[in-house]
Amino acid sequence: MTTTTPASRAARLLSRPIALGGLTVPNRIVMAPMTRMFSPGGVPGEDVRSYYARRAAAGVGLIVTEGTYVGHDSAGQSDRVPRFHGEEQLAGWAKVAQDVHAAGGTIVPQLWHIGMVRQQGEAPYPEAPAVGPSGLVTAGAEPTGKAMTQQDLDDVVAAFAQAAADAERIGFDGVELHGAHGYLLDQFLWEGTNRRTDGYGGDPVARTKFAEEIVAAVRAKVSPDFPILFRYSQWKQQDYKARLAETPQELEAILSPLAAAGVDVFHASTRRYWLPEFDDSGLNLAGWTKKITGKQVISVGSVGLDGDFVKAFQGQGSPVKGIDNLLDRMEAEEFDMVAVGRALLQDPEWAAKVLADRFDELKPYDADALKTLS
Ligand SMILES: Cc1cc2nc3c(=O)[nH]c(=O)nc-3n(C[C@H](O)[C@H](O)[C@H](O)COP(=O)(O)O)c2cc1C
């Protein structure tokens, strides 16, 4: 009888290619989007190129870039976050895509509008107001920004669609729409920040209308097989305990219109992938997303983050946080791909080590990794 070690099972399950729309991704490991603020003037430079290319060369199948602002004056607030509009900025991004492809990887930009999280008066558009569905930054807050007019909504929809068209034109493999973590799209999805009464607020279906219009506008501007990923979360950076949906039925009301509008892949953002989402099942948020929509789904949250994960490769450590739990879920097809954030930020070789059974070389995460773009 041959025995299968946890290690070789990891390599087998994670190294399978997958087709997302017209794109073939060489394996199941995704780099999670991570804002790094190393792009002065909003232009990703040579260091950003090599940061991503290094990870593609070392086995990451699909890179989701850090959030990058769409072309709307209120979309962002930092001049060091890369922008996805403007000649110089897009030229920088085109080179990032080229380098990632040359290294054997695939890449999508994460298109971002921060909405009410913007603190007024910062670069690159100091005069622009913070905007959102109702001018609220979090549940129960007093309005501190502008409730968006129909014109504002139309402008932002157009900005996302233009950014997606540009992504395809300059050589990216798809786009991810940032609908998570309490930023603009999520401010519409979440009733805590969406108090509108005009068809964009109210029940979950109405609160989804704005994101749905963005997906449909993007779909109309790109090729039919150009993959659209949509990232969403229950948690908000304003409130980790907030939830969009208390039941699978409420989640379905949000996800179904998005799927129908053209989303190919959902990226269900959780902080710990092993936690069940609703009471009556062990499925995590990604698992429920796949069950509800039938679409391909990426899971994420604390993969490879602590010593337990490393030890579990060697048959010790927590069975919950370790690799076996993740692989069981992948084997059961609970979700299709797994995104890795901080572990990959720290170690560009993380994917190569996992795919080649070099588990002894994995190291626990250290927050010092945030300081550089290595
Ligand atoms: C430094 C940093 C920046 C992040 N920036 C983004 C971002 O721009 N967009 C996004 O959707 N998530 C962002 N995230 C969340 C990550 O994509 C990911 O969901 C989270 O870190 C959990 O994965 P991990 O436990 O593997 O790190 C960021 C996380 C970190 C640590």
Image: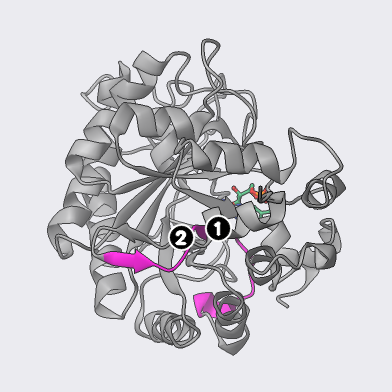
- State the residue lying farthest toward the front: 1
Quadrant in the picture for residue 345: bottom right
Q: Provide residue 308's location: percent of width, then percent of height.
A: 84, 44
Q: Is residue 241 visible in the rendered structure shown here?
A: yes
Q: Provide residue 273's location: percent of width, then percent of height.
A: 62, 37
**Is 366 in front, or is 85?**
366
Q: Residue at x 18, y 52 (%)?
A: 217
- Numbered badge on residue 12: 1
- Numbered badge on residue 63: none
Q: In the rendered structure, which amino acid carries the disc numbered 1?
A: Arg
- State the residue lying farthest toward the top: 280
The reply to whether callout 1 and callout 2 are in contact (CB within 8 Å) is: yes
Does residue 39 belong to the magenta stretch?
A: yes
Q: Residue at x 70, y 68 (%)?
A: 353
What is the spatial separation of the Cα atoms under label 1 and label 2, in whole angstroms?
A: 7 Å
**Is 127 in front, or is 29?**
29
Residue holding disc 2: 16
Which image quarter holds the C terminus? Answer: bottom right
The reply, left or right, for residue 180 in relation to residue 260 is: right
